[in-house]
Image (cartoon, rainbow, N blue to C red):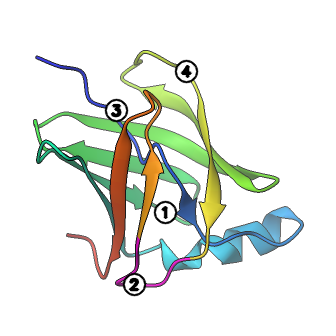
Amino acid sequence: MRARAWWIGCAFLVLAAAGPAAAQSGMSSAFGNTIVSNYPDGGWVKHWFNPDNTYVAHFSDGRRISARWRVEGRNICLTNIRPSMMIPRFCSRMVEAEVGETWTARDPLGRRVRNTLVAGRT
């Protein structure tokens, strides 16, 4: 089975203002919604960010992971990834996005993905 990147691996939501509280509020578009990353081969990953800095992802092949997220400057970083994967930490730049918007980015292996912010927890 071919390994698929296990996270957003790309641009995340909402460019944060300075400071942790502002960054947290900048992530509010993600809270309660789903970010879906689609791969050219038809695979997908669904990403869920929570206000308590927890993160969960579900892959089209049935795998699931969990992690902790935090804002670092203009990046969002995932750490404490469980189960342990090929890298212990992953950071990606954040972008502004509203429900229904789509953007392209690269996953941790450099593969292009198309992300969409979808309303609700799908």
Q: Secondary structure at mark 2?
A: loop
Alpha carbon separation for disc pair 2 and 4: 29 Å
Instruction: Identify the mark at residue 99; answer none if there is no mark.
Output: 2
Residue for badge 4: 88
Q: Give the mark, 2 or 4, whose residue is nearer the N terminus.
A: 4
The disc, 1 or 3, on the residue closer to the chain's N-terminal end is 3
96 falls in the magenta region: no
Whether pointer 4 and pointer 3 mark residues with C-beta atoms closer than 8 Å, the reply is no
Mark 2 nearby-residue class (10 Å; few <14, some 14–19, many ≥20): some
Left or right relative to 84: residue 69: right
Magenta region: 97-102
Q: What whole-number distance in Å separates the C-alpha atoms at marks 2 and 1?
A: 16 Å
The residue under label 3 is which amino acid type? Ala
Choose top left, top right, bottom left or bottom right for residue 115.
bottom left
Which amino acid, by three-letter code, is at mark 4? Pro
Q: Earlier in the sequence, mark 4 or mark 1?
A: 1
How many numbered circles are shown? 4
Q: Residues within 10 Å of mark 3 (few under 14, many from 20)?
A: many
- N-terminal label among 4 and 3: 3
Farthest residue to the right: give it. 18
